[in-house]
Amino acid sequence: MAGKAASATLMTDGPIWKRMIAFAVPLFWGNLFQQLYNTADSVIVGNFLGNNALAAVSSSGNLIFLMVGFFNGIAIGAGVVTGKYFGAGDSGNLKRSIHTTIIFGLTCGVILTIAGVLAAPRILVLMGTPDEVLPQSLAYFRVYFAGSLAFVMYNFFVGILQALGDSRHPLFFLIISSFTNIALDLLFVGAIGMGVWSAAFATVISQFLSASLCLYQLVKGNEAFRLKVREIRPDTQMLRQIVKNGVPAGIQNSIISVANVFVQSNINAFGATAVAGCGSYSKIEGFGFLPITCFALALTTFISQNLGAREYERAKKGAVFGAVCSLTIAEIIGLVINLLAPVLTGAFGGGPEAVSYGVQWARTVTWFYFLLAFSHCMAGILRGAGRSVVPMFVMMICWCVIRVSYISIAVRIVPDIRTVFWAYPLTWALSSVVFLVYFLKSDWIHGLEKM
């Protein structure tokens, strides 16, 4: 593919470790700022508006991921198609995949906006959100989803850029939007006192900014993969491939979120203080998951590009390297969080009792971050190979059906919040075993040839 721009990187040649780490490091920093972006709302709201406001933001988190996660998964799956054609040097199909992805993303964004705003009251009630928290949670949720188009399009734009091997520009754009979000949070919540809904408004504004910057990067990119407004239209063949790869990934994200919403409803039963404390830990956990998510995304891009170029042995070696790095770093971070849990959870405010809930959760699950890392890496590898259906079913069974069944039974026998916390490491272990068996015994590496 002649004249590739510097912003696009082929991962089909050069040292595997250097290519993957060079791609993963900007992803790490990008995810770090994304987590700061998400955490700023909780820290500022908790310290300025108090425990109920913090609980309102916390109780909305899993529900937001439930609805946004589906479309984010589709964006990742769409990136596999783009990465395959980029790795193969097929400019014509590369352009068609990018333009079809954009029109599909716009459609998804409109659907999510309508569904989120209309469904919010009923879902929050079904989750058992405490009465004293519900009004503020609903206000936060509705404002957040009024800006759904920005969130969806940002993820579709980033999916395309990352499929082209560009993890640097999304990082720069996230840094800009993160600082914008924090500044607006301090202005709206701290200085003006506009209420918990204004934290969501600040996030929406910041996300529109980052989406606009990504769009600009695609519009001014190299001719081989430049986004042109007049060419944005669906291509039937590309749409089938995007749906085939993206929908299972989206369902996988949603399945995980359904289970987490069920977990959240059980946490809600322990009261607003438990909701606030557990919500604080979940924000900290997001930082612990950074190496997991960045290596999983790096593996998806690496595998899709190399299989597109028919570099099968290179794909195998990259899969092993990425998984080992992710497991090692994730476990180190887990142990650090375990040690510093009281200090980290206390930064969110909410009082000593809320902090104790967060610490209990941290010290139950952080020992097992390596299991979560392994499962996500296997999912990323299989997704990059065009086998998105496999991780979808594994997550559906292990992280949804079994997790929900365990909680439904175990909490009745042992009505302690730690019983809920143990649902995570137990189901992480189960999915890891299933993925390992599949990885060792199946011919996963030839998936893209059948697309």
Image (cartoon, rainbow, N blue to C red):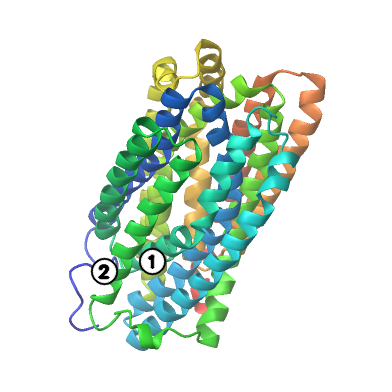
**Up-down relation of residue 165 to residue 47 (above or below):** below
Q: Earlier in the sequence, mark 1 or mark 2?
A: 1
**In the structure shown, which secondary structural element does the residue marked by tag 2 occupy?**
helix
Looking at the image, which is closer to me, 340 or 422? 340
Q: Position of residue 372 (x, y in %)?
A: 52, 39
- Say whether marks 1 and 2 touch (CB < 8 Å): yes
| Res. 309 image quadrant | bottom left
- Which quadrant: the C terminus? bottom right
- Which quadrant: the N terminus? bottom left
Q: Position of residue 450 (x, y in %)?
A: 55, 78
Q: Which disc, if any, is residue 11?
A: none
Looking at the image, which is closer to me, 210 or 329? 210
Looking at the image, which is closer to me, 324 or 419? 419
Q: Which disc, if any, is residue 157?
A: 1
Q: Residues within 10 Å of mark 1 (few under 14, many from 20)?
A: many
In percent of the image, x 39 and y 87: which residue is there? 231
Q: Residues within 10 Å of mark 2 (few under 14, many from 20)?
A: some
| Res. 311 image quadrant | bottom left
Q: Which disc, if any, is residue 217?
A: 2
Q: Is residue 128 left or right of residue 45?
A: right
**Up-down relation of residue 271 to residue 327 (above or below):** above
Q: CA distance from mark 1 to mark 2?
A: 9 Å
Q: Amino acid at mark 2?
A: Gln
Q: Position of residue 39 (x, y in %)?
A: 41, 36
Q: Amino acid at mark 1?
A: Phe
**Up-down relation of residue 135 to residue 297 (above or below):** above
Give the mark count. Answer: 2
